[in-house]
Amino acid sequence: MGADPYGRFALLFLLFAFVHSLTAADFFKRRVKKLLGVEGKSYRLAYNLLSVLSAVPFTVIWLSARRETPLLLHLEGWVALLAVLLKLAGAAIIIAGVVQTGAAEFLGLKPERKRLVTSGLYARVRHPMYLGALLFLWATPVLYALDLLLCILATLYLIFGMYVEERRLLADFGSAYESYRSRVPALIPVPRRPKS
């Protein structure tokens, strides 16, 4: 794979992030609708397919070169088991979030309904899928240097994604989202105080 996969990996990840962000932007969706007439579930399906395809190049480098980079962490025993369980919990949170908001809509198989989801996982945190993704990324019993680069870049991108999503939700739902945001934390669930 070559002596220095870091630069190529970072460049391809940033290219993925750019394509993913650009095609998610409202101005880009309006442009595609105007030029090609593609919108709604057709756009969402194409967006998802493009997201997967644009992730392939950096994923190939990561999978093929990660073990060629220095090993930074190797947990064993119950600590490794705990890391794996946290990773599985992260995956379960992502899946539950997709199911709760509508898997068919998320995948682009059904038209998206604009609605503010505030129950279930979303009653505990505003961005459960981001929380799940962060758990899935960071809870690992084995960490190579290229894994660390992936975790850092993906975390920065998720933070950027949360910021953009918060702005979009505020624009779409106004005071209803503002009220929800004041009651529910973004990522870290906190125990609710009993009502007196």
Image (cartoon, rainbow, N blue to C red):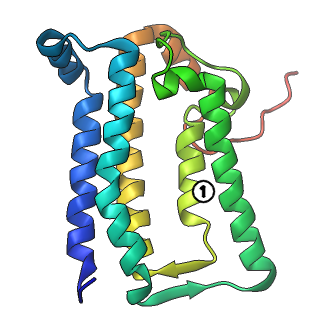
**Along the horizontal axis of the image, is 68 left or right of 127?**
left
Q: Residue 124: horizontal and vertical position, in percent? A: 69, 33
Task: Determine which quarter of the picture holds residue 87.
Answer: bottom right
Q: Residues within 10 Å of mark 1 (few under 14, many from 20)?
A: many
Q: Residue 13: horizontal and vertical position, in percent? A: 28, 58
Residue type highlighted by circle 1: Leu
46 relative to 20, above or below: above
Task: Determine which quarter of the picture holds residue 75.
Answer: bottom right
Describe the element under mark 1 as helix, strand or loop: helix
Q: Quadrant of the C terminus?
A: top right
Task: Determine which quarter of the picture holds residue 187.
Answer: top right
Residue 48 visible to the viewer: yes
Which residue corresponds to the image point at 44% horizontal and 64% vertical from the top-left? 151
Q: Residue furthest left?
A: 35
**Along the horizontal axis of the image, is 157 left or right of 133?**
left
Q: Residue 56: horizontal and vertical position, in percent? A: 34, 56
Reading the image, the residue beneath label 1 is 135
**Camera-side residue: 55 or 27?**
55
123 relative to 158, above or below: above
